[in-house]
Structure formats: structure tokens, C-alpha cells
Amino acid sequence: MSMLEGFLYKPKESPLHKLDPRSKAVILVFYTVTSLIYLDPIVLILLLLSVVLLSIVGKCVREWSKSVKATLTFALVIFILNVLASPGLGYTYALAMSLRFLSLAAAFSLYFLTTPPEALALSLEAAGLPRDFTLMLTLSLRFVPTLARDLQIVTDAFRSRGLKLDSGNYVERLYNFAKLLTPLIVFEIRRSLMIAEALESRGFGGAVKPSLYKPPKMSLIDYMITAGGLVALGVIVCYHLGFPQ
Amino acid sequence: MDYEDAIVVKNLYFSYNEKLVLKNINLQIKKGEIVTIMGENGAGKTTLIKHFNGLLKPKKGKVIVLGMDTSQTPVSQLARHVGMVFQNPDYQLFAETVEEEIAMALRNFGFPEEKVKARVEWALKVFELDRYRKRSPYLLSIGERKRLSIASVISYDPPIVVLDEPTAGQDFLQKEKIAELLFLLKQMKKTIVMVTHDVEFAIKRSDRIVLMADGEIIAQGPTFEIMSSIELLERARLKPPQIIETAYILKRKNILPSEISIFTPKDLVEAIAKNVDA
């Protein structure tokens, strides 16, 4: 669950936290597009280093490093799979694929660590996205800690009835862990039905489109970052399309 | 070590993420006792009982269960001696049928198959779940699910039974059934530890009350002694049982003498009758 913690909003006083989710989203798109179109390890390392700098600005190095540490295992798997599956492309290619995954995960982790889900939903709603979609996004982020707590309670209940989850061989443990899924799924389905009923009883999904209590506002810095991000994105894409590698 | 004690807690400290949630807990629970732990939400009650079967290990101090140090003993071994019934039955049910649900713990503890069958039959009868044996646990009512969660623990006959909020969300009839089960467990010489906010339920069924507030035990003693102290109950943010509160008001208004002990409606009626006669 520590990996998920690195993708959950942590309230702090930092310049990155103060930015509007939309201007940060433009920078996120820049990082995503750049890591997807470039396969040069040096470019990808530079991208990764710039995210490190941003995490210092955002005062969330500790939380951010948790998610990066957890994704390192996946990056290693990607490296091994690429070496095995495409032997002709060499180690540099495999390294670039791992770095691509790492820089994407690092950038998204930083974005979610510094952006409250409610502000993100409001901004998306203000940008014209349907409310069902924004609610889905907010709820999925909101329920990560709840799901972690539920998993802990179910684990405790089963261990109390003699289920061995921390001893025995791997197959046995995996089989025992699978037993936890039944109560967890049943409970989460029941919870989602309860939430749906609670939302409907409070008028969600009515014919009238609700107005926003506090419409999100972009500051001058937000506009400057958005403009800078869009220009940088345009340059990167044009450079890539104009001079294919 | 005194083996007359089922559970001994010595200078227990526990913290979650550097926040101290249990402070210097000292407690002794004798074999065959019914002890109720009470206190407001966040007082540390559930954290304390999770130490009894080793789900949580002390940060400082010791918890000894039937002579076993919980920090040195795995949960799977302690669970055989300490049956824990969680507050919400939905978190602990998983099997396709009611009888499979009861058999789960028995198989985990390596009971021979003929014994598993015999215990399942016994539990189905005692807990009045016989007619649902082939039904999915999730199709039972909340009261039946609660009984099933207790049955699945009692079936493997642990000498200590810990119940977390056994009456939460239960109607009067279900509460009475749970009270009957407690009586049955008492007859079976089990040691029972209960966590509840339900003062009316606790006053009738406990031998001893432990009051907690802010991670500490603020008082412990015989049920009547603790329940009669309005000040102590207030400190633990609990409302006194109706009978105690009524007697307290009558004593304050000098309708009843202050030295008289009133614990049950019968005591109150007799005291009033005596006063009227006088």
C-alpha cells in the first residue's frame, strides 16, 4: 500500500500545491509526451532529474520517493522482459523503456501528491467534462485509504481464525490471500451501492446542472506556466516530427 | 507466572505512526471471568484487544496469554486459544455455505475431519443456523450473520473469547440471543472479554468493567462499583445505565437514602416500597 500512498494528495504549503490543477496538467502532458516520443536514456534521465527538482519545490520528496521506490521493481521487470523479448535491440533500448516507465510514474505521482482530488474534479468540470466522470475520479482516489483499511480488517479477521498469511510456502500463502478477496469484493460492492443511494438521495444526477460553489480560478503564474508548457510541448513535437531519429 | 490468569497485561505501550494510542496499560483477567472494556471512540479499546491474540505486538511492556508471551508467539498459535469475533461480520465471512464458514477455522487448526463435522453440527444447532447450512452467508440477515461469525469462532472451542461490539446494530431480540450465548459461554467456563458502548447490556452481563479514556485505563473494578460512579462514567464519556441514573436522581432529591445500593429494577422497587412504608 506504500506505493499507493505516493499517489495520494498530501496537503502542504508549497508553490507546486498552489498551482491550478489545469496548469500542472499541461506540464504533466509535456512530461508524458516527451517520455513517450523519446527513447534516448539521457533525455529520460534529464526528465527524471527535473521531476526530482520539482518534488523538492513541492516539499514532498519523502512521499514521492516511496512511489518511485515501489515502481523500481516494475521498472526492473520491464528491463528484463525487454532484454529477453527483443535481444536485437540491446540493453540501451531496455534501459530506455524502464526509464520511460519510471519518469511517467514519477511525474504522475508528483501531480497527485500536490493536487487535491476535489480541485482536480472541479477543474475538469469547469473544463466541460461530465460530472459522472469527475465524480468517478474523485471517488476512486478518495477510497484508496478506505480500501487499505478494509484489507487490514479482513486480514486481521482471517488471521484470528488461524489462516496463515505470513508463513508456509508461496503457493499456500497466495491461495490463502485469495480467500481475502471474497469478503473484500462483497463489502466494496455493498459500499458502492450505499454511496450511490446516498448520492441519489442528495440530488446527484438530477436534471438541473449544478453551479460551482467556488469556481476554480487561474492566476497569472498559472497562465504563464500553461503558455510555457504548451510552447515547450509544440517545440518538442515539431522537433520530433521534423527530424525523426 | 500465575496460570489462574487468562490474560496479563504489564506496562503496555503501543503507538501507530508515532502516535501513542495505549499508555501504561496494566490488566489481569482471571479464567472464567466476563470482563467488559468500555470507553469513548478512539479510547484504545480495539487496539488493546488486538494484543490478546497477537495481531498487534507491544511496543513496550508485555502481554501474557495463558502463559504465552504474545510478542514471541505467532498469531496462528495464539488464535487457537483466543477466539476473536470482529464487530462487522461481513469482514470475516467468505465461504460458499454456512457450514463451510464454520468449518474453515477448524480445518485451519488441523482438526480431524470427523471432529470438524461433529463441531459444525454442534455449532449449527446451538446458534440456530441449522436450516441455513447450505445457504450463502451473505444471504443471511444481519443478526444471523453476527451469530454465524460467533459460531465460526466458538466451534473450535477457544478457552478465551474476545467480542468486539457484539451488540452494535442488533435489535432487542438479537441482543437477547447474544446474551444467551454469553450465558452459554460462561457455563462452558470460557473467559470472555467484551468491548462495547452498550452500558445496559454490559451492566447485566459483566463481572468486571474496565474503563478507558485517551489510551489509558482510568478505572477497573466490579461492574456495580464502576457503573455506580457517574463521575467515572462521565470521564469515559459514557451515559450511566437508566436504573443507576434514576437511583442517583432519587438520592439527590432525598427520596431515597444515599447509602443504599441499587443495581436492578427490583432493587429500585424494593427501596421505594421500603421508603413509602417508612
Image: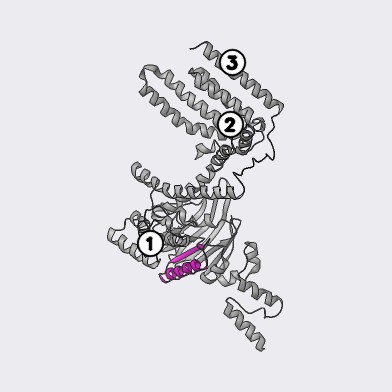
Give the class, few, some or many, for how many residues have Cα within 10 Å of label 2's Cα (few <14, many ≥20).
Answer: many
Cα separation between marks 3 and 1? 69 Å
Residue occupying image coordinates x 71% and y 29%? A219
How far separated are the C-alphas under marks 2 and 1? 51 Å
Report x, y in % for residue B78: 41, 56
Instruction: State the image coordinates of residue B105 (x, y, percent, origin top left).
Output: 37, 56
Q: Which residue is mark 3?
A: A235
| Badge 3 amino acid | Val
Q: Determine if residue B204 is in view.
A: yes
Q: Tell which subunit mark 2 falls on.
A: A
Q: Is residue A48 found inside the magenta-colored segment of the image?
A: no
Q: Is residue B77 above or below residue B240?
A: above
Q: Chain of mark 1?
A: B
Query: Which residue is painted at 47% across and 60% down in the image?
Result: B142
- Residue kind at label 1, given as amino acid type: Tyr
Q: Which residue is mark 2?
A: A111
Q: Which mark is residue B132?
A: 1
